[in-house]
Image (cartoon, helix red, strand yellow):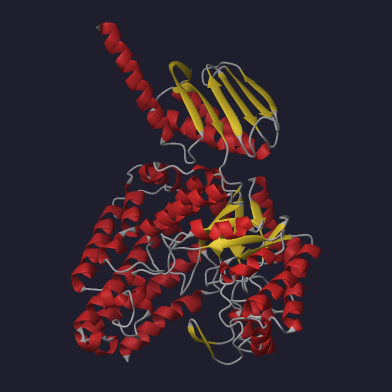
């Protein structure tokens, strides 16, 4: 009986040990075997090894390290090898036995990823104060290119310090591609008028970022929109002759002008060619994202006659091909957003086969399963491009994001996607702080490497431990709670939550919009309580990460901004005609006082992570609401 009980105890201990280790592994390994009878290193020795591995983390080398036993040093043999023949691309094999660590990488990137796993394993041993068991890991990514795209054109242009810290995080999560979405925030030498108020990136800064990324096995892919979303160029009269719609056109978004280039004007192409020649030499990547999404004015203005003759889709494709030829001449391979060509599916087969379609969709139920095969069947490479769902939210829409990221990862792997690009946009003021995006960035990195339904069970622990460095555990708990507060409003899903909609649509009817017409006072009050409860938890948070002090400030600001949206929504639902202008003066005065403080704090916090350019435009969104209150 004693022998049976001991065997049961050993089996239980083994299962518990494996489970404890697993929660420390950010990217779930494909194969993990933990011995229940062998101890490799003590917790004290793991702490020493962690420091040594950190020193070797970015070094490109293979060979052996022999450590001799001292009072603080374990006797150990560390072996690092490259084997490009037996392992899958970017894969690695990790064997930890008593006194030995053997790492085999398919390439230097594989070795780097193995070191990230090693550091997480050592962290388990040190934090849990448990010996590190003997174990074997065989691992590789499901998707070749795992990226993050950061919008640096919608007001927020991050400081170099912010980007360096972010790149460090991304590399430790095995992300290997970064894109900075540029419309007008690069300092093109002959176009000062376009970027003068934007605090743009210089060529020297891009080169620094490129080198920093490269050391961490991240490919910094240039990204310059080249067709739609050119309003920051076309609003200046010297570029007006390039506009598809110099005056209002009736688009699917309503009346619009000066957002898209006229693809039939040779000077549009000439402009982009000259920009490419200046922009691309600052990057070492062989890829280049030329954008070309949401060309909503196409065929409604200066290209109308040609579009009527050969078809709007063909006009789009002709211009896309011309841009691709130029990209190829400059030694790069083009990526492009796939939304417009999906509106003309018969033309997908005519895409150049050296282009990569970036198939984006941000709703929980976006049909990656239906759209990806259209490119696969045409022999065109493609990425899945989900998003963080943090823009137009202030505090996040985590449930939507997690489903979106999950579907992208599953369908991407199923259909053979070349890449997974998690996108973070900054529409309408870029009010969401960077720390609000951390949960969805971490989940996206995990899913892109190897989707596991258990990832969400570990996310709170991993955020607190590896991102916020919070021994109390309250930072992640509060931020995750904030990120789901929008669900309490119970309105239809959309690319914005109720809090943002109130801040954005203050002049418009509530009953004419599919989301706002479903708002009710009880549901808004339920969301208000959820946010206040999250803030109460956050008051007890102890983030000690490098940006911990910033996190403390920016999360409170974001939550208070969301609460202001709720307060405005409740006031409108009580007012005549649900109109902002009809809110009683006493209530309006409270809103004015609250918003004045939020605007001041918004300006104070902006420079903690970002450059000054874009602040006035972002703040103006709130200042316009303030003036509307005042009448």
Q: In which quadrant will I find the N terminus?
A: top left
Instruction: Please name the residue shown 71% across and 62% down the image.
Output: 204
32 or 590, nearer to the observer:
32
Res 96 → quadrant: top right
Outermost residue on the right side: it is 329
Residue 230 on image: x %, y %? 61, 78
On screen, residue 300 versus residue 394, left or right, reads right
18 with respect to 385 (left or right):
left
Classify 104 as above or below 207.
above
Drawn side of residue 428 relative to residue 67, left or right: left
Decide: is 133 above or below 628: above
Residue at image point 26% right, 63% down? 488
* Residue 473 coordinates in the image, percent (x, y): 33, 45
Q: Which percent across, then down, holds residue 385? A: 53, 59
**Left or right relative to 213: residue 430:** left
Q: Which residue is drawn at 32% across and 59% down?
A: 482
**Residue 386, how many percent across, how many down?**
50, 59
Q: Can residue 73 be seen in this view?
A: no
């Amino acid at each position: 009986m004693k022998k049976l009980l001991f065997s049961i105890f050993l089996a239980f201990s083994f299962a518990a040990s494996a489970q404890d280790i697993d929660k420390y592994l950010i990217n779930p390994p494909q194969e993990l075997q933990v011995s229940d009878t062998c101890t490799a290193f003590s917790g004290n020795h793991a702490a020493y090894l962690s420091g040594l591995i950190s020193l070797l983390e970015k070094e490109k080398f293979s060979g052996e390290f022999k450590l001799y036993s001292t009072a603080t040093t374990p006797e150990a043999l560390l072996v690092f090898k490259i084997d490009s023949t037996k392992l899958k691309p970017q894969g690695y094999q990790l064997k930890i036995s008593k006194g030995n660590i053997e790492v085999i990488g398919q390439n230097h990137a594989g070795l780097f990823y193995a070191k990230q796993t090693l550091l997480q394993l050592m962290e388990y041993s040190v934090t849990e104060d448990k010996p590190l068991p003997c174990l074997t890991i065989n691992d590789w990514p499901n998707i070749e290119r795992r990226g993050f795209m950061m919008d640096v054109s919608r007001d927020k242009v991050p400081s170099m310090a912010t980007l360096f810290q972010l790149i460090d995080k991304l590399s430790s999560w095995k992300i290997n591609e970064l894109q900075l979405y540029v419309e007008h925030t690069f300092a093109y030498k002959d176009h000062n008028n376009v970027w003068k108020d934007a605090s743009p990136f210089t060529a020297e800064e891009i080169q620094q970022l490129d080198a920093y990324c490269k050391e961490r096995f991240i490919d910094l892919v240039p990204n310059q929109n080249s067709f739609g979303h050119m309003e920051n160029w076309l609003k200046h009269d010297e570029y007006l002759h390039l506009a598809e719609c110099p005056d209002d056109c009736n688009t699917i978004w309503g009346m619009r002008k000066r957002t898209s280039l006229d693809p039939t004007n040779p000077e549009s192409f000439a402009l982009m060619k000259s920009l490419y020649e200046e922009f691309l030499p600052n990057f070492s990547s062989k890829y280049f994202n030329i954008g070309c999404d949401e060309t909503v004015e196409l065929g409604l203005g200066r290209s109308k006659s040609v579009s009527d003759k050969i078809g709007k889709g063909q006009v789009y494709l002709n211009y896309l091909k011309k841009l691709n030829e130029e990209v190829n001449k400059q030694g790069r391979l083009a990526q492009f957003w796939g939304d417009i060509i999906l509106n003309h599916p018969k033309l997908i087969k005519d895409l150049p086969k050296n282009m990569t379609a970036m198939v984006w969709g941000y709703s929980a139920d976006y049909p990656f399963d239906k759209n990806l095969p259209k490119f696969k069947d045409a022999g065109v490479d493609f990425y899945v491009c989900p998003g963080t769902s943090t823009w137009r939210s202030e505090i996040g829409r985590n449930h939507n994001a997690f489903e979106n990221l999950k579907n992208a990862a599953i369908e991407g792997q199923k259909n053979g996607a070349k890449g997974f690009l998690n996108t973070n946009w900054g529409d309408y003021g870029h009010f969401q702080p960077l720390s609000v995006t951390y949960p969805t960035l971490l989940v996206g990195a995990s899913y892109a490497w190897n989707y596991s339904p258990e990832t969400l069970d570990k996310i709170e622990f991993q955020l607190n431990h590896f991102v916020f460095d919070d021994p109390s555990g309250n930072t992640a708990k509060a931020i995750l709670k904030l990120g789901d507060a929008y669900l309490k409003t119970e309105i239809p899903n959309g690319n914005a939550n109720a809090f943002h909609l109130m801040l954005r649509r203050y002049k418009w009817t509530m009953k004419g919009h599919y989301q706002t017409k479903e708002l009710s006072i009880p549901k808004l009050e339920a969301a208000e309580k959820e946010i206040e409860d999250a803030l109460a938890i956050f008051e007890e948070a102890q983030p000690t990460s490098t940006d911990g002090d910033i996190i403390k400030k920016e999360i409170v600001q974001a939550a208070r901004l969301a609460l202001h949206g709720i307060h405005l929504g409740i006031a409108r639902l009580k007012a005549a005609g649900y109109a902002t202008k009809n809110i009683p003066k006493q209530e309006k005065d409270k809103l004015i006082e609250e918003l004045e403080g939020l605007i001041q704090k918004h300006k104070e916090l902006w420079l903690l992570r970002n450059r000054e350019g874009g602040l006035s435009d972002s703040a103006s969104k709130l200042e316009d609401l303030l003036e509307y209150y005042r009448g």
